[in-house]
Amino acid sequence: MFFLLQAAAKQSSPGGMLSMLLPFILMFVVMYFLILRPQKRKEKERKALLSRVKKNDRVVTAGGIHGLVMSVRENELILRVDDAKDVKLKVDRSAIVTVLEVSHEDTEESKEITKESKV
């Protein structure tokens, strides 16, 4: 038995070591392109979404609460949940999952500014 192990050790070459590592390298490359890269792209999109949240946007939180953004601070938002009773909640910015409706105030203001500058 000992002689078989010695014979196998003598037959291994540097190319044999590369052929043993090749499946692990290929597995890492496939994992990078199928898992890591899309995850990084989603994280960038989420950060961009959270940075664009502004007053009068309709949003949904991770807990499923729908609300209208009343004010925006660095790390928190004030959402108006019920118009009739004027119920407001303070939530972390990271709790926002989706923006349902974007306010159009900025686009209207920019149109007015361009009209005034032309006159």
Image: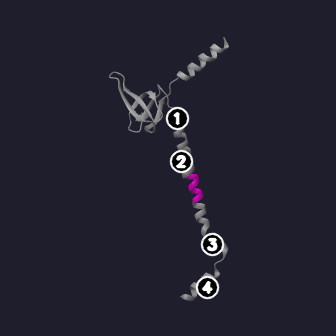
Q: Residue furthest left?
A: 85
To which residue does mark 3 refer?
Answer: 17
Is label 3 in a helix, a strand or a loop? helix
Residue 25 locus on image (x, y percent): 60, 62
- Work out whether mark 2 precedes mark 4 in sequence or the reverse, and give the earlier one: 4
| Residue 40 drawn in magenta | no
From mark 2 to mark 1, how far is it between C-alphas? Answer: 18 Å
Asked whether, in this view, residue 102 is left or right of residue 111, the answer is left
To which residue does mark 4 refer?
Answer: 7
Could you say which disc has been placed on residue 39 in the image? 2
Front position among marks 2 and 4: 2
Nearer to me, 85 or 18:
85
- Work out whether mark 3 precedes mark 4 in sequence or the reverse, and give the earlier one: 4
Point 63% across, 78% down: residue: 12
Task: Tell me which amino acid carries mark 2.
Answer: Gln
Could you say which disc has been placed on residue 22 in the image? none
